[in-house]
Amino acid sequence: MNISIRLSKPHRWGLYVVWAILSITGLYFAYIQDWQMQEPTEWTINILKLHGISAAFMLLFVGSLLSLHVRLSLNRKRNMISGLMTLSCMFILIFSGIGLYYSPEDWHENMIWVHIWLGIICFLLLPAHIFIGYFLRKKMPKKKNKHHHL
């Protein structure tokens, strides 16, 4: 039995949508609050809430990838470098996100910048991982279906 590493269409598009919401809200909030240093408004507070909700959904997606996609990719040694970089970045983002709420106060400023910069890196890594996987899959020879009749 040959099990595909590739995600199902609903799984893949759900991941893309959650990743896009998470990325856009995180980049927007970091830009307004941390680079522009604007006072929080009801809008930015709601953006941060949406970021937190989408982060919870992203945790579900990351967990769902571990059981099949990551395990099979590691066994087959496929797209491992970008995959492990993306996964590592996501795990550190999870811990830095937790640190934003639960770390000691004197760590808070550093935790913000670790989270922002890792978020930017992950924003770039996930699409890179997807495109590398796409091109690697296109380069692989097609498997013949032994049940195919002329």
Image: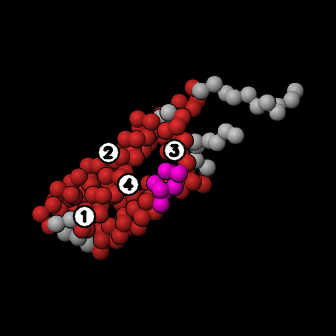
Residue 41 pos. (x, y %)? 26, 72
CB within 8 Å, label 4 to label 1: no
Q: Where's residue 137, x and y in %?
A: 57, 32
Inspect the magenta stretch and tell me whether residue 75 lies in it: no
Q: Identify the residue position indicated by label 2 in the image.
A: 121
Q: Which mark is residue 23?
A: 4
Label 4 near label 2: C-beta < 8 Å? no
Q: Nearer the viewer, residue 20 or 150?
A: 150
Which three-letter amino acid code belongs to the residue tagged 2?
Answer: Ile
Categorize mark 1 by other alpha carbons within 10 Å: few (<14), some (14-19), many (20+).
some
The reply to whether the magenta stretch includes residue 64 is yes
Residue nearest the viewer, comparing 113 with 66 = 66
- The residue where tag 1 is placed is 100
Residue 147 point in image, percent of width and height? 82, 33
User: Do the residues bearing badges 2 and 3 touch, measured as CB atoms within 8 Å?
Assistant: no
Disc 2 versus disc 3: distance between alpha carbons?
23 Å
Please name the residue that numbered disc 3 is placed on.
Answer: 71
Magenta residue span: 60-67
